[in-house]
Image (tube, rainbow, N blue to C red):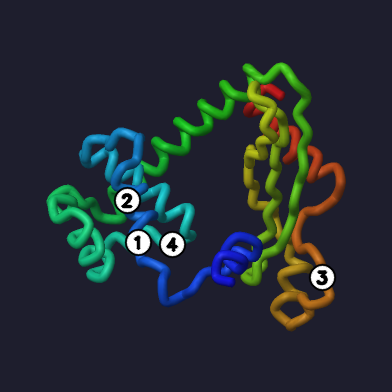
Amino acid sequence: MTNHLNALHNLRNPKKQCVSSGTLDKFVQSPHPKKPLSVESLKTALLYFISKCDLPLLVVESPAFHTLLDFCNSSILDILVCWAALTSHLSKMYFFHQEHLFNILSDNNTFVSFTTNTWTSPNVRAFMAVTAHFLNKDFNLKSVILGLIKLNCNQYHQYLHNVGLTFSLVFLGDHSGASLAQHFMEILRKYNL
């Protein structure tokens, strides 16, 4: 009966299941070579972590974060940087990735499609994002944000927000077709598209 449950229904006896650290073993035996630890590599890794997890830059000042890093590798605390140092590195990374994206799009011999998204934040700031969609050389669909622009919010919309009437507004700001098209074209010109 046990063989039947195991073979056909993939049901195993929970008392006989062994506990393994398969995931940890795979991580430790990763075929990817470890990158040398330096101030630059740590700043880059921290910025990827902070952006992917949607955390504030100040997380690097947290004692709990220091404890976690010390647990992983105590030598990291010797080269850990403050949030202000991360801001300058963030600018360098932004321009590096922008140039990398420019090269990808210029090497791309296929068609590129675009989508836009406009919204107003709870604190009455209007934004427009432009995203490019294309197939890369390996025929994988890629979507990348080309730009994010803060749109102007006129005084009438500001007044409506101040008196509590924002619930009736879908979008606050300069959202005429001509204005959005102008912002859209500005972003495309940055990438020669």
Question: Looking at this rendering, what residue extends furthest in the bottom direction?
Answer: 163
In the image: residue 174, left or right of residue 6 = right
User: Label 1, label 2: how many angstroms apart (C-alpha)?
Assistant: 9 Å
Picture coordinates of residue 150, whole percent (x, y): 64, 52
User: Label 4, label 1: how many angstroms apart (C-alpha)?
Assistant: 33 Å
Which numbered circle lies on residue 145? Answer: none
Which residue is tagged 4? 55
Return the disc, 4 or 3, that comes first in the chain's sequence: 4
Which residue is tagged 3? 169
In the image: residue 171, left or right of residue 34 = right
Return the disc, 1 or 3, that comes first in the chain's sequence: 1
Return the disc, 4 or 1, that comes first in the chain's sequence: 1
User: Label 2, label 3: how many angstroms apart (C-alpha)?
Assistant: 53 Å
Provide the secondary structure element on which disc 3 rests: loop
User: Label 2, label 4: how many angstroms apart (C-alpha)?
Assistant: 29 Å
Which residue is tagged 2? 25
Which numbered circle lies on residue 20? Answer: 1
In the image: residue 147, left or right of residue 100 = right
Residue type pointed to by label 1: Ser
Provide the secondary structure element on which disc 4 rests: loop
Q: Residues within 10 Å of mark 2 (few under 14, many from 20)?
A: few
User: Label 4, label 3: how many angstroms apart (C-alpha)?
Assistant: 29 Å
Provide the secondary structure element on which disc 2 rests: helix
Q: Quadrant of residue 30?
A: top left
The residue mark sitting in front, 1 or 2, is 1
Q: Are marks 4 and 3 in contact (CB under 8 Å)?
A: no
The residue mark sitting in front, 4 or 3, is 4
Residue type pointed to by label 3: Leu
Residue type pointed to by label 4: Leu
Q: Are marks 1 and 2 in contact (CB under 8 Å)?
A: yes
